Amino acid sequence: MAEIYTNETPQEVKEAKGLHLLTQSTPNGQKVQIMLEELAAVYDWYLRLNPNGRIPTIVDNTKERPFSVMETSAELLYLVKKFDKDGLFTFDDELEYSQMLQWLFFWHGSGAPYQGQLGFFSRAAEKVPMAIERFRNETLRVFGVLEIQLSGRYSDGPREYLAGAGKGKYSIADIGTWTWTSKWKLGGFKEEDMNAQFPHLLKWISRIGERGAVKTGTGSKYEKK
């Protein structure tokens, strides 16, 4: 495997021990920040770590040669496989594990892109009404999918978490979804409309937000000094 560090890589990155997270406290960055808190209770040098040139990136220095991991869902999966030995944030059962992957990938591929584009076009200096309307409607649609799951409309009643039997269990599927959905106000949605359409989703957002690691993973600890 090719060496990922160059002469341009900052010395503090090269000399980091253990697991090293390169991030900013954005919704995507916060996914991995939260996961690390739960477990712990663009330059050329960066492109070698993450060819996509986006944050966050994990560098695992516990390997014989430093190993980098990109893409937030892949990073969450890497962290639970390597460090969550008790399975606190994942599942041993094959079907529950599959359900966790389904919701993790659903938001990664069908949720975050729409909500992200809604935010971009809503804040752009030049407004494109058709784009705003499209991404607003798609964001509402995926919120509706989450509401169906959390309300238990087609199962045995309301759920507390996205994946797992019964009411579910807190897992990386929740972490991977919460950092974006919790920012719903940035999309210009009104609270009364959200309460009317997505009551179970809002309760879930509040429930996840009360976790200590979530507060730390989205707080001042990860703000640029």
Image (tube, helix red, strand yellow):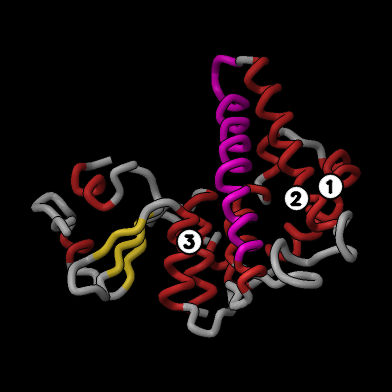
Foreground label between 3 and 2 = 2
**Spot occupied by residue 60 in the image (x, y as percentages of width and height):** 30, 68
Q: Secondary structure at mark 1?
A: loop
- Assign the N terminus to one quadrant of the image: bottom left
Q: Secondary structure at mark 3?
A: helix
Q: Amino acid at mark 3?
A: Val
Q: Which residue is mark 1?
A: 198
The structure residue drawn at horizontal position 73% and vertical position 29%, both measured from the top left corner, is 137
Q: Which residue is mark 3?
A: 32
Say the numbered circle drawn on residue 146.
Answer: 2
Q: Amino acid at mark 1?
A: Phe
10 left or right, relative to 84: left
**Spot occupied by residue 86 in the image (x, y as percentages of width and height):** 54, 84
Within the magenta stretch, is there residue 103? yes
Residue located farthest toward the front when viewing the structure as drawn: 94
- Assign the C terminus to one quadrant of the image: bottom left
185 left or right, relative to 102: right
Using the numbered discs, state the Cα–Cα distance from disc 3 to disc 2 in whole angstroms: 21 Å
* Front position in the image: 173 or 217: 173
Q: Secondary structure at mark 2?
A: helix
| Dot 1 alpha-carbon crowd within 10 angstroms: few under 14, some 14 to 19, many 20 or more | many
The structure residue drawn at horizontal position 50% and vertical position 61%, both measured from the top left corner, is 220
Toward which corner of the image does residue 161 lie, by quadrant?
Answer: bottom right
Magenta residues? 98-127
Q: Amino acid at mark 2?
A: Leu
Contact, CB < 8 Å: mark 2 with mark 1? yes
